[in-house]
Image (cartoon, grey):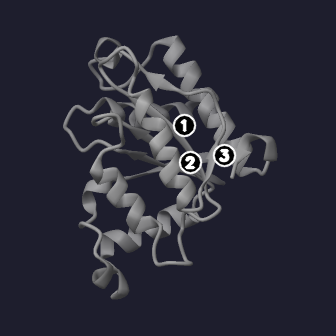
Amino acid sequence: MTEIVLMSGSIRDGSYNSAVVATLRRLVAERFDGVRTTVVRPAELPFYEEDMDAANGSEAVLRMRNRVAAADALVICTPSYNGAAPGVLKNALDWLSRPYGESCLDGRTVAVTSASPGPRGAVDAQPGLAEVLGHAGALVVEHPPVAVANAGELLTPEGVFEDPDTLAALEGLVRAALAAARQDAPSVAA
């Protein structure tokens, strides 16, 4: 069984990025045999603090580290806050990148996507997020940017996306992540 961990960088109720995660979860269940998903929530983690980390963090930190370490790939959907990923997401990545030399992100395949109510779909947050992931040792999936623009217009009352273009783009991103996780080297940038 292949496992993908899904993470939304937004903690807002009604978040478009969390809706992308819900859509990815449904899409994987419907279209990918032998692949399961788990969702992790950055809001469950305390602010990163090195003394706490030296004492093995918290239960929430250990749970998230274990889930990511056991996964074949991680897919992160981020909003753009002033052109960058939000602090809650960066905080989660700081926890996952520690302790030094034992990062569960080191060598982990990670795909990045984004969503927003605007016409660019928060695509401007993706390069900085990919850079942070690269510093943490993750293998960021090379793929044309997947950014859900005008997300408020596309979101169904059930809180997912069903329009064919969005589903096709998200499916392509999942396929690229799975290929990279299976070590199809051209799909991965170090």
Which residue is at 57% across, 65% downward?
Answer: 70
Q: Nearer the viewer, residue 158 or 59?
A: 59
Q: CA distance from mark 3 to mark 2?
A: 7 Å
In this rendering, the answer to whether 49 lies above or below 31 is: below
Which secondary structure lies at badge 1? Answer: helix
Q: Earlier in the sequence, mark 1 or mark 2?
A: 1
Q: Quadrant of the N terminus?
A: bottom right
In this rendering, the answer to whether 11 lies above or below 161 is: below
Q: Which mark is residue 36?
A: 2
Q: Is residue 69 visible?
A: yes
- The answer to whether mark 1 and mark 2 are in CB contact below 8 A is yes
Which residue is at 34% across, 19% downward?
Answer: 151
Q: Nearer the viewer, residue 92 or 6?
A: 92
Local crowd size for mark 3, using a 10 Å CA cut-off: few (<14), some (14–19), many (≥20): few
Local crowd size for mark 2, using a 10 Å CA cut-off: few (<14), some (14–19), many (≥20): some
Which secondary structure lies at badge 2? Answer: strand
Left or right of 118: which side holds 190? right
Q: Is residue 75 visible?
A: no
Which residue is at 59% across, 57% downward?
Answer: 138
Q: What residue type is disc 3 on?
A: Gly
In the rendered image, which residue does mark 1 sit on?
A: 29
In the rendered image, which residue does mark 3 sit on?
A: 34
Q: How many marks?
A: 3
Q: What residue type is disc 2 on?
A: Arg
Q: Indicate the position of residue 75 as horizontal and vertical percent values.
A: 51, 44
Q: What residue type is disc 1 on?
A: Ala
